[in-house]
Image (tube, grey):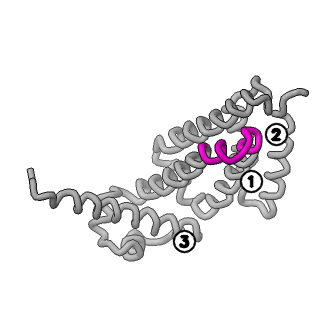
Amino acid sequence: MDTTGKDKPLRAHAARNRDALIAAARDAFEAGELDIRIEEIARRAGVGVGTLYRHFATRETLIEAVYRQRVEELCGTVPRLLTELTPYEALRAFLRQLIAHAAASQGMATALEAVMNTGSPVFAQTRAEMTDAIATVMTAAAAAGGIRGDVTPETVFQAMGGICTGHDRPDWEDGAHAVVRLLLDGLRASR
C-alpha cells in the first residue's frame, strides 16, 4: 500500500477523466453526432483511447453512463423544486422538466436504441428513479391537498412516457405541454 498519498491524486485524476469522457460523449450525442467514433470522444475529452476503455468497456456502457447522468440530474431537481415551490407547482415543474428531458434525448434516441438491444438494466433502473422522483413530488402535493391521492406515480410516469414518445414529431412539445395541463387538471383534488 502506498502511504505517500500518491493514490489520492490518481483517483481524483481518474474521476476527472471519467467525467470529461461522459461530458464529451453527452455533448456529441445531444448534438446528434451519433456516429462519433470512440477515438474522437477520447480526443475531445483530452484523454487517450486506452483511458476511455478503462472506464467504459464498450460504446454502450458509455451511452448508459451519459443517460444515467442525465436522469440523475433530472431527478436531483426534486428537492430544490419542493423547497422553492408549492408541492403542486413542484409537480407541474417536474413534469415540464420530463418533457424537456425527452426533447434533449432526441439526439440520443438512436444511441439509446443500441443500448436497449443489449438487454441493459439501465432503463429499468432509470425508470424506477424517475418514478420515485414523481412519487416524492406527488406525495408532497397530496399531503398539501393539491392533488388526489388515488393516482399512483406509476400511472403518471406511464402517462408521461406516452406523452414523450412523440418527441420526433414537429411541434410535439406544445402538444406535450397541453396534455400535461390535462393530466394536472385530472390530478387536482376536488374542492
Q: Amino acid at mark 2?
A: Leu
Disc with the residue nearer the chain's start (1 vs 3): 3
Residue 60 picture location, percent across and down? 44, 55
Q: Which mark is residue 183?
A: 2
Is residue 68 or residue 12 the one in the foreground?
Answer: 12
Residue at coordinates 63% horizontally, 34% vertically from top-left?
A: 136
Residue 150 versus residue 49 in the image, above or below: above
Find disc 1 in the rendering and name its residue. Answer: 166
Disc with the residue nearer the chain's start (2 vs 3): 3
* Cα gap from disc 2 to disc 3, whole angstroms: 34 Å
* Cα gap from disc 1 to disc 3, whole angstroms: 21 Å
Find disc 3 in the rendering and name its residue. Answer: 33
Residue, far front? 84
Asked whether 70 falls inside the magenta stretch, the response is no
Residue at coordinates 84% horizontally, 33% vertically from top-left?
A: 188
Dot 3: element = loop
Disc 1 residue crowd, few under 14, some 14–19, many 20+, Cα 10 Å: some
Is residue 14 or residue 108 the one in the foreground?
Answer: 14
Residue 99 picture location, percent across and down? 71, 53
Residue 124 versus residue 14 in the image, above or below: above
Residue 93 versus residue 140 in the image, above or below: below
